[in-house]
């Protein structure tokens, strides 16, 4: 059962995340941005740490999070 989806836009962080969670079927690491993965209703919660100050369009990020929820 998948329980956690990690969306990581920094390409250099994807491999370390995948290595860290290798063998844990509950964790999926998704490269790219939330907008690429934010299908309606695919998330029960969105946790964004140090994100809004780094995205070009923070309102769009919040809309994408809303879509995912």
Image (spheres, rainbow, N blue to C red):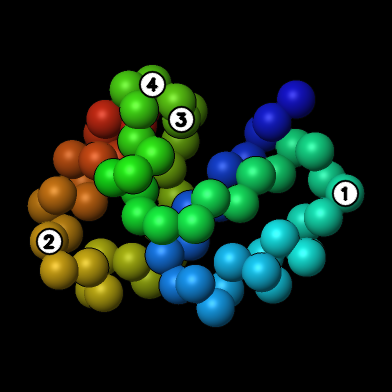
Mark before the other along the chain sequence, 3 or 2? 3
Residue to which mark 3 is pinned: 43
Q: Quadrant of residue 16?
A: bottom right
Residue to which mark 1 is pinned: 23
Quadrant, the C terminus = top left
Residue beneath the point at 75% across and 37% down:
26
Q: Quadrant of residue 1?
A: top right
* Residue 26 shown left or right of residue 36 in the figure: right
Q: CA distance from mark 4 to mark 3?
A: 6 Å
Instruction: Determine whether the residue tagged by mark 2 lies in a helix, strand or loop.
Output: loop
Near mark 3 (Cα within 10 A), the count class, few <14, some 14-19 or many ≥20, is some
Q: CA distance from mark 3 to mark 2?
A: 21 Å
Check contact, mark 4 vs mark 3: CB within 8 A: yes
Residue beneath the point at 32% across and 22% down:
40
Q: CA distance from mark 1 to mark 2?
A: 35 Å
Residues 23 and 49: in front is: 23
Look at discs 1 and 2 and give the one toward the viewer.
1
Look at discs 1 and 4 and give the one toward the viewer.
1
Instruction: Determine whether the residue tagged by mark 4 lies in a helix, strand or loop.
Output: loop
Horizontal and vertical percent position of residue 32: 41, 57
Q: CA distance from mark 2 to mark 4?
A: 22 Å
Horizontal and vertical percent position of residue 54: 26, 74
Horizontal and vertical percent position of residue 6: 55, 51
Residue to which mark 2 is pinned: 57
Residue to which mark 4 is pinned: 41
Q: Residue furthest top?
A: 41
Mark before the other along the chain sequence, 1 or 2? 1
* Residue 4 shown left or right of residue 35 in the figure: right
Instruction: Determine whether the residue tagged by mark 1 lies in a helix, strand or loop.
Output: loop
């Amino acid at each position: 059962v998948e329980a956690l989806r990690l969306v990581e836009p920094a390409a250099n962080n994807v491999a370390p995340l995948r290595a860290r969670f290798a063998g844990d079927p509950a964790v999926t690491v998704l490269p790219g941005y939330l907008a690429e993965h934010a299908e309606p209703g695919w998330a029960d919660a969105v946790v964004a740490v140090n994100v809004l100050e780094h995205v070009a369009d923070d309102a769009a990020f919040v809309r994408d999070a809303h879509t995912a929820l």
